Image (tube, rainbow, N blue to C red):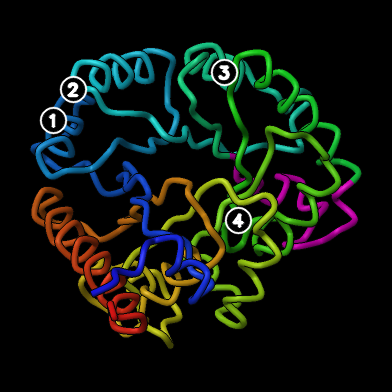
Amino acid sequence: MISVTPFCLTMLLGVTALADNAFFAMDTGTKDAQHQTAEAQVAMIKDIGFAGIGPIYSTPQALHDMLASLDKHQLKLFAEYFPLDLSASDPISPQIKDAIQQLRGRDSMLWLCVPVPADKSLKPSDPTGDPRAVPVLQAIADLAEQSGVRVALYPHAGNWLQREEDAVRVARQVGRKNLGVTFNLCHWLMVDGKDLDARLDEARPWLYVVTINGADVDGHDWGHLIQPLDTGTFDVSRVLVKLKQMGFEGPIGLQHYGIGGDADKNLRRSMEAWRRLQTNLQNKISQTNPTK
């Protein structure tokens, strides 16, 4: 019998050899009454099997504590989340500068969402905001580059930067090698939910990170669009198969915003679902190209 090598699978299927994408937990799902501190959250995700975390920035001390706990447990901070206020007199806030310094040399990212400005001068997806946003993002990327930090735009429903197309359009104009985009399943479903392959193909040259979760195909609110990974009617394997076809090797984050309840139990459910998804993906490829 002749085995089909991973390279042959790639050639036959147009699917890359199955390398494990790092799977991390966003801190939207790591906090509950028993897990308030960075240490408690990191110890929990370590025990469950996550590769690290993607937290929302709050204070310099909170980031310091999170990094210390991650180092202790040998896990990674994949991305630190910030809203970027284009209406501020200096959008490059002291908090952004602090995060860049603390993340120096850690192969990490700033996760930047860009809300509608407080003065409502821009509407969601309004391209007339590009001349306002692009120089700010170029300056942030240049500052981050000095510390070896990347910047990933985060499309968020209702924000000025809300669609995948918005993130790609802006990233193209920024033109910095350390600035890319995120694909967020729940936000794509909320604002679009169509042409998944096309959206991912467009994002491919800039795609740094992806977030997934359980969701319902026809959901119109976060309760239906953000669920544990083992529930919902949307077939998340569609995203994973496409990412493999694209050769995407970046990290994948788990979104649990608003789910509530026991964080440990919720995360374990989603981790088990993630493992099943990986096994099923391997089986699909094996069944399509059995050994001869």
Dominant secondary structure of the residues highlighted in magenta in the image: loop
Crowding at mark 4 (Cα within 10 Å: few <14, some 14-19, many 20+): many
Q: Mark 4 or 2, which is nearer the eye?
A: 2
Disc 1 vs disc 2: Cβ atoms closer than 8 Å? Answer: yes
Crowding at mark 1 (Cα within 10 Å: few <14, some 14-19, many 20+): some
Q: Residue at x 8, y 55 (%)?
A: 265
Quick one: label 2 or label 3, which is nearer the N terminus?
2
* Relative height, residue 183 to residue 99 (above, below): below
**Which amino acid, mark 4?**
Pro
Q: Residue 31's image quarter?
A: top left
Left or right of 41, for residue 95: right
**Which amino acid, mark 3?**
Ile
Quick one: label 4 or label 3, which is nearer the N terminus?
3
Q: Residue at x 45, y 60 (%)?
A: 7
Left or right of 100, for residue 115: right
CA gap, disc 4 and disc 2? 31 Å
Q: Mark 1 — residue? A: 43
Crowding at mark 2 (Cα within 10 Å: few <14, some 14-19, many 20+): some
Q: Mark 3 — residue? A: 100
Relative image position of residue 197 (x, y in whole percent): 59, 76
Residue 155: image tag: 4
**Which amino acid, mark 1?**
Ala
Q: Mark 2 — residue? A: 73
CA gap, disc 4 and disc 3? 21 Å
Q: Residue at x 35, y 55 (%)?
A: 255
Q: Mark 1 or 4, which is nearer the eye?
A: 1
